[in-house]
Amino acid sequence: MLDDYLPMSTITGSLALFFIIWWTTLFAILPFWVRSQAEDQANHEIPAGTEPGAPQHPMLLRKILVTTAVSVVVFIVVSVIVNNVDL
């Protein structure tokens, strides 16, 4: 009975694993393509009351799309490994 069970065989387990991979990948990708207001000071004034280290343009949509693409690839690799390795 236990031989038929695979960790990736349930939709809930697969979604949970994908969510963990996506969230971890998001935090790995967040620092990319960031220029702070202080670095971009030559082109723009730093608005009063804001942190100079705050990003000028966070590019969150781009980061979410890259995170999703990387997460799909990592999820496929992990699911192939999990389903093909005998424990």
Image (cartoon, helix red, strand yellow):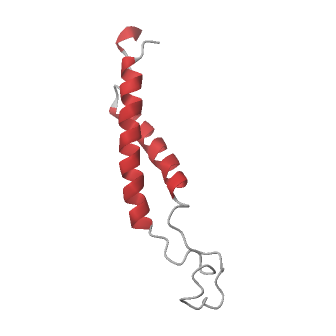
Residue 31 visible to the viewer: yes
Determine the residue positioned at 54% across, 52% down: 28
What is the x, y in percent for residue 84? 37, 18
Residue 7 visible to the viewer: no
Determine the residue positioned at 41% across, 17% down: 85
User: On the image, which quarter does residue 50 sit in?
Assistant: bottom right
What is the x, y in percent for residue 72? 36, 43
Determine the residue positioned at 37% across, 58% down: 65
What is the x, y in percent for residue 21? 46, 42
56 lies left or right of 4: right
What is the x, y in percent for residue 48? 64, 91
**Is residue 71 positioned above or below 86 on the image?**
below
| Number of callouts | 0
70 lies left or right of 46: left
User: On the image, which quarter does residue 79 sit in?
Assistant: top left
**Is residue 8 positioned above or below 69 on the image?**
above
Determine the residue positioned at 34% across, 28% down: 10
**Is residue 63 positioned above or below 76 on the image?**
below
In the picture, the quarter occupied by the N terminus is top left
**Is residue 35 positioned above or below 14 on the image?**
below
The single residue placed furthest to the front in the displayed view is 42
